[in-house]
């Protein structure tokens, strides 16, 4: 009985999460007339035209490649820079460590309106406007606070005895960090990696202002299907649906350590 | 001993350096620029004639009803949306953690709202909310309920925005909690089961307290982000009807980008920053999240 209600709740929540996507998929197989039919149609003659148009459109492939480079780059550099800082903040107290942590957090609090124009000027001067590396740097900066703070939370849950034993064995701080602490924090790295990837993959405002002509990520590109007079529902929904495939692949790849008890259960 | 100390300090320094350089480089300049601008009447319409007007932007802000309305809308939106999301996120993370069939499928379905391009999702919501051809009113009629104007009505506009935000961001909290649950030790849960505790008791007495650092962090980040929500509100209501869903961020956008008065927009941004810093400091101090509980000796 309990199991029954739990499953009922779980599937109801799945339905809630899935329904808007279902509607998007539904729209992607409709003609523009069906997409705006009144009342809305559930059963209709599906067409592939939207997909064939999008697949033949080289620009959409360009958005896809740009997004992939930016999101992978952001995840990689974000974790490389953020995880060490998180580890130190979780394991050591030093003068000003609380303020330093708070300062990192505060970088997420500034409203984008205050950042955009100075960012643009800075990028113009540095000559990194409209480059992959430029957008990657901005995205790492936007997400570093979340990487550092969440990873710190994960490190604090890991008992210190193992690391202490490693010091007793004569390992250095660096060895202990990458041989012991990093492998132990894989559930955290996996969750934070997924979050960083998704944030970067979907970020719109900075990608628009700092990119847009040479490097155009998918959120910016897809916005092109929203005209002033008319929304191109067919292409918008078809390309958004196709763009989900690589993301789901990435999430699937990265979620393994999230499966319970895989890493820590054994010795805790 | 001093050799050890030196090595430790070197380690701390090297581990923090990349993050520090990047963040100083990226945030210091924008912050200083908008801080200075907020004391001027700088406008992109007449950039040559900027004057220092000291606190005038702030005084104007504090004496405008529009500001206080925007502040109230922002707070109501943030508090309600984040509260609902935390409850749903923690609940479904726990339920999913205890489930053993189709877990991978469910997890993937739950993460979909975070994965889909927000532009496409938000416009799909706009289509679904449409009073005459939207699927929501279609369902309302099927259930014999009164169709709603959703985004256009003063009664439902803010509620509709909270609904969309909840749909999009609950998975963020859920994901953090799943990661947290996966890294908690098993013994307390097993011991409680042996002692015959009910699922509800385990949830309230063990899961939530042990997961608390993660819930606190998820709540903190979600609140910071919700406080400056822009995209969904801009696309769905643009702050309407009237100014009933106009948040501080939209208010700043209106002045900065539409009226091009960057000085005034800068002062709104600084006020938002101060509010966030104060609330976050109180929250972190109360919950003792600023410093690690324990450190390596």
Image (cartoon, coloured by chain):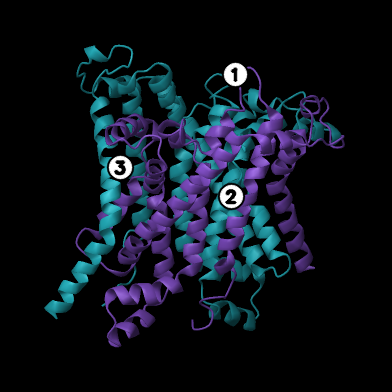
Chain colours: A purple, B cyan
The chain carrying label 3 is B
**Residue A119 visible in the picture:** yes
Residue A121 position within the rendered picture, expressed as x and y whole percent measured from the top left: 30, 30
Residue B16 picture quarter: bottom left
Helix, strand or loop at label 3? It is: helix
Q: Which residue lies furthest to the bottom in this view?
A: A169
Q: Are marks 2 and 3 on the same chain?
A: yes
Residue that carries the numbered disc 1 in the rendered image: A228
Lower position in the chain sequence, tag 2 or tag 3: 3
Q: Are marks 1 and 3 on the same chain?
A: no
The chain carrying label 2 is B
With B257 as the anchor, is B132 left or right in this view? right
Residue that carries the numbered disc 2 in the rendered image: B170
Residue B203 picture quarter: bottom right
Q: How crowded is mark 2: few (under 14 residues within 10 Å), some or many (20 or more)?
A: many
Query: Alpha carbon of mark 1 to alpha carbon of mark 2: how far?
Result: 31 Å
Toward the viewer: B292 or B179? Answer: B179
What residue is drawn where x is 69% and y is 37%? A238
Residue that carries the numbered disc 3 in the rendered image: B26
Mark 1 vs mark 2: in front: 1
Is residue A128 shown above or below B222? above
Residue B250 position within the rendered picture, expressed as x and y whole percent measured from the top left: 46, 27
Helix, strand or loop at label 1? It is: loop
What residue is drawn where x is 77% and y is 33%? A49
Query: Alpha carbon of mark 1 to alpha carbon of mark 3: how far?
Result: 34 Å
Is residue B291 shown above or below A168? above
Helix, strand or loop at label 2? It is: helix
Residue A1 picture quarter: bottom right
């Amino acid at each position: 009985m309990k199991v029954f209600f739990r499953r009922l709740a779980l599937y109801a929540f799945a339905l809630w999460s899935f329904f808007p996507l279902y509607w998007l998929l539904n729209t992607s197989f409709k003609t523009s007339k069906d997409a705006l039919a009144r009342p809305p149609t559930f059963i209709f003659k599906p067409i592939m035209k939207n997909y064939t148009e999008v697949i033949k459109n080289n620009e959409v492939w360009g958005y896809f490649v740009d997004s992939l480079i930016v999101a992978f780059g952001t995840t990689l550099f974000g974790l490389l820079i953020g995880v060490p800082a998180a580890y130190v903040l979780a394991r050591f107290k030093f003068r000003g460590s609380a303020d330093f942590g708070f300062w990192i957090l505060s970088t997420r609090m500034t409203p984008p309106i205050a950042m955009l124009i100075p960012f643009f000027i800075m990028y113009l001067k540095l000559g990194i406007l409209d480059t992959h590396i430029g957008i990657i740097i901005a995205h790492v900066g936007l997400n570093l606070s979340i990487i550092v703070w969440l990873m710190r939370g994960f490190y604090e849950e890991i008992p210190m005895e193992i690391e202490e034993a490693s010091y007793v064995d004569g390992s250095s701080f660096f060895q202990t960090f990458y041989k012991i602490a990093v492998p132990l924090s894989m559930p955290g790295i996996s969750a934070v990696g997924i979050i960083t990837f998704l944030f970067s993959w979907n970020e719109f405002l900075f990608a628009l202002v700092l990119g847009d002509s040479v490097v155009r990520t998918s959120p910016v590109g897809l916005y092109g299907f929203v005209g002033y007079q008319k929304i191109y529902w067919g292409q918008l929904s078809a390309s958004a649906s196709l763009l989900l495939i690589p993301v789901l692949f990435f999430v699937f790849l990265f979620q393994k350590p999230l499966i319970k008890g895989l890493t820590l259960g054994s010795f805790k | 001993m001093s050799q050890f100390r030196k090595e430790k300090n070197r380690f701390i320094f090297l581990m923090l350096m990349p993050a520090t350089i990047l963040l100083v480089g990226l945030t210091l300049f924008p912050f200083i620029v908008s801080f200075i601008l907020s004391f001027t009447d700088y406008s992109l319409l007449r950039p040559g004639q900027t004057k220092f007007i000291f606190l005038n932007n702030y005084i104007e802000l504090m004496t405008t009803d529009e500001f206080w309305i925007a502040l109230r809308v922002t707070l109501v939106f943030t508090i309600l949306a984040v509260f609902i999301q935390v409850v749903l996120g923690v609940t479904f993370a726990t339920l999913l953690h205890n489930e053993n069939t189709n877990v991978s499928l469910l997890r993937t379905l739950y993460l979909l709202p975070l994965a889909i391009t927000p532009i496409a999702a938000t416009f799909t919501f706009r289509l679904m909310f449409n009073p005459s051809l939207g699927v929501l009113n279609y369902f309302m009629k099927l259930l014999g309920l009164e169709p709603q104007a959703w985004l256009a009505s003063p009664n439902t506009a803010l509620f509709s925005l909270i609904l969309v935000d909840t749909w999009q961001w609950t998975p963020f909290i859920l994901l953090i909690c799943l990661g947290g649950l996966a890294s908690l030790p098993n013994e307390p849960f097993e011991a409680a089961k042996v002692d015959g505790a009910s699922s509800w008791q385990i949830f309230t007495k063990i899961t939530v307290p042990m997961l608390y650092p993660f819930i606190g962090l998820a709540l903190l980040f979600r609140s910071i982000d919700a406080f400056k929500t822009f995209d969904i509100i801009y696309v769905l209501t643009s702050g309407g009807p009237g100014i009933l869903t106009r948040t501080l961020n939209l208010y700043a956008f209106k002045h900065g980008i539409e009226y091009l008065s960057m000085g005034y927009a800068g002062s709104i941004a600084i006020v938002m920053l101060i509010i966030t810093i104060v609330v976050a400091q109180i929250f972190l101090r109360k919950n003792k999240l600023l410093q690690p509980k324990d450190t390596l000796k």
